[in-house]
Amino acid sequence: MKRFLNNEFWMLSVQGAFQRANCYHKTASEKEKAAFRSALKNFIDQHILPAYKVEVSEEQHEHNILRIIDFSRTSSSLFVADALNVGISQKLLNLYLKYHWCIGEIATPPHFPVDRIIQQELKMKPIEPWTRFKKIEEYREVINHAKTLLEKEGLATLAELELAYFNRRATAAL
């Protein structure tokens, strides 16, 4: 059951991070993309995810995002920009962590998946296209804005804040 859930979490995370990113060269085959995603999953599962069994600092978390970018350079020929960018890498890692956290597999992640929807919920102005974040500072700007809302919302962590906003939005849609 744990393996099934992990694979589902990975599939959902990949879909969320890559769906609108247009990061692959048009010449990259589906077989090459699948092989890269499989290798990336193994890298994250073996070298990044275990650290989150306990709380991870924001600095270490940002470092892990950059490690994903570095790993993607091993398959640079697949990508338009020779590697994944900060936006895609943070969304992939943060979604994956969110799912594992929600079932109690890891400690509370320091951040949340940054995308257009959360920027709207946070009332960011302007809303920046997360799929184009190239610098960690662009990502950090959204995180720092969210930190200003924690006390107002009566929440202790950024992960809880995002989950509260996500749940409100989902409930409103029903």
Image (cartoon, helix red, strand yellow):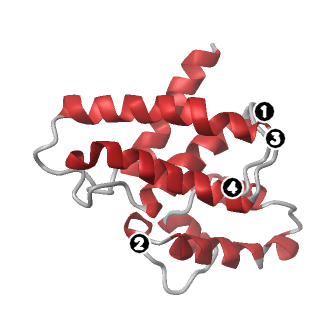
| Alpha carbons under labels 4 and 3: distance apart | 12 Å
Q: Quadrant of residue 36?
A: top left
- Which of discs 3 and 2 lies nearer the camera? The answer is 3
Q: Are marks 1 and 3 in contact (CB under 8 Å)?
A: no
- Amino acid carrying mark 3 in the image: Val
Q: Nearer the viewer, residue 48 or 163?
A: 48
- Of the pair 123 and 146, the residue shown nearer to us: 146
Disc 4 to disc 1, how far (Cα)? 20 Å
Q: Residue lying furthest left in this view?
A: 27
State which tag comes first along the sequence, 4 or 1. 4
Q: Is residue 49 left or right of residue 130?
A: right
Residue 38 in the figure: left or right of residue 149: left
In the picture, measured across the screen, residue 23 lies left or right of residue 57, that is left
Q: Nearer the viewer, residue 90 or 166?
A: 90
Give the secondary structure at mark 4: helix
- Residue at the spot 52% in from the left edge and 65% down from the top edge: 117
Vertical arrangement, residue 168 with respect to residue 1, above or below: below
Query: SS class of the residue under badge 3?
Result: loop
Looking at the rendered structure, the secondary structure element under dot 2 is: loop
Give the amino acid at mark 4. Gln
The residue tagged 4 is 60
Q: CA distance from mark 3 to mark 2?
A: 31 Å
Contact between labelled residues 1 and 2, with CB atoms less than 8 Å apart: no
Of the image marks 2 and 1, the number of the one nearer the N terminus:
1
Tag 2: Cα neighbours inside 10 Å, few (<14), some, or many (≥20)? some
Q: What distance separates the C-alpha of mark 1 from that of mark 3?
A: 11 Å
Asked if 142 appears above or below 93 in the picture, the reply is: below
Check whether the beta carbons of the residues at disc 3 and disc 2 lie within 8 A of each other: no
Helix, strand or loop under label 1: loop
Q: Amino acid at mark 1?
A: Gly
Callout 4: 10 Å neighbours few (<14), some, many (20+)?
A: few
Where does label 1 land, which residue? Answer: 104
